[in-house]
Image: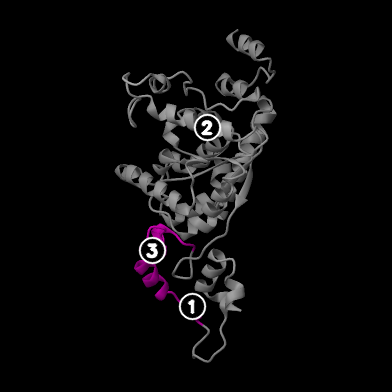
Amino acid sequence: MKNEENKMQNGINTGVEAPYAVRRWWWRSARGEVRPPPGVRRQSTWHKAARRPQGGARPLAFGEVGDHEDRLYTAIEIQTERFTMTCKTVLTGDRPTGRMHLGHYVGSLKNRFALQETHRCFYMIADYQALTTHEDRAREIEGNVREIVLDYLTAGFDPERSVCFLQSQVPQLAELTMIFSNLVTLPRLLRNPTIREEMQEMGKSERTTYGFVGYPVSQAADILLFRPELVPVGPDQRPHIELAQEVAARFNRDYGEVFPIPEGVYGERLVGTDGTRKMGKSFGNAIFLSDAPEAVQGKVAEMVTDPARVRLNDPGHPEVCSVYNYHLMLDPDAETAVA
């Protein structure tokens, strides 16, 4: 009965089969208003304290009860004022498993931060998902979150234009993950090539956890809850975006049109300093965004440039030179300058 009353009040027909937990926030957003996920209070302690005259109680400090939700809602309100509803929404994020490197920059960071001027951008730090591979290093996550925020700022994140938040700030993401987990079969998850590759690289085939195999479902919830049109990610994340698209399509088919089908925006894959594998923290072949200039110079000096060029006067082969590829990806005028 409560569901029917809410539908009458909002004048929206979303279909009686849709789960109430999902419809609850969908009804609010479908009226043309930008709302945060459910549970983020509008008239909150933080907002009331902030409106009090001088001499009154201070606003809650960061980390106090209620503050994380309220700050997120305030940021979303600012985004609403800056953009019209015709502006496309962008959602993407990273797991706080360590410092970010050039592979992250050319794979995703460059694309996502270039959209800030013309799109409503939300960047999530997926602290819960970090536990899927770092369950034994949970104490490192807090420090890694700080490192990622600093790397974001280095790569072009503008807190005046976009919103950055923690996955754990939005408990409704876990709720939606639970709902979506009933729409995806285990064989479908195991067919994910990125999951299989990571299982082999980390030697997790014999001790794979439920959370690790299922984190693409959590990622689908992270994406779809904010109903974005664009998701800028690295090329190895394509299977995850495809799964999110499948989940959205199945939910819409079974319960009514709720989620737009997001479109992936894919960056480039950068080879590591070893010249053989993709750049990665665990491979020891990364140039980090926070590396000092002398550290970068040392890593580049050790790279193999052209194995086919034995003598100094032999012709070069820039197409197989990793350093030349770095130039092409990081400097748009590099090819003209070298030529």
Callout 2: SS: helix
Q: Which mark is residue 223?
A: none
Question: Can you say whether 325 is above or below 61 in the image?
Answer: below
Viewed as shown, does residue 126 lie left or right of 64? Answer: right
Name the residue type under label 1. Answer: Thr
Q: Position of residue 281 (x, y in %)?
A: 40, 58
Q: Which mark is residue 284?
A: 3
Q: Residues within 10 Å of mark 2 (few under 14, many from 20)?
A: some
Pick the quarter of the image with the N terminus. Answer: top right
- Tell me which corner region of the image, top left, top right, bottom left or bottom right, holds residue 131: top left
Pick the quarter of the image with the C terminus. Answer: bottom right
Of circles 1 and 3, which is in front?
1
Q: Position of residue 74 (x, y in %)?
A: 48, 29
Of circles 1 and 2, which is in front?
2
Name the residue type under label 3. Answer: Gly
Which residues lie in the magenta part? Answer: 278-307
Quickly name the residue at label 2: 78
Quickly name the residue at label 1: 305
Of circles 3 and 2, which is in front?
2
Q: CA distance from mark 3 to mark 2?
A: 41 Å
Q: Residues within 10 Å of mark 3 (few under 14, many from 20)?
A: few
Q: Position of residue 148 (x, y in %)?
A: 41, 48
Q: How is the image coloured?
A: one colour
> Is there CB contact under 8 Å for labels 1 and 3?
no
Q: CA distance from mark 1 to mark 3?
A: 18 Å
Q: Residues within 10 Å of mark 1 (few under 14, many from 20)?
A: some
Q: Residue at x 60, y 53 (%)?
A: 266
Name the residue type under label 2. Answer: Ile
Q: Residue at x 45, y 36 (%)?
A: 167
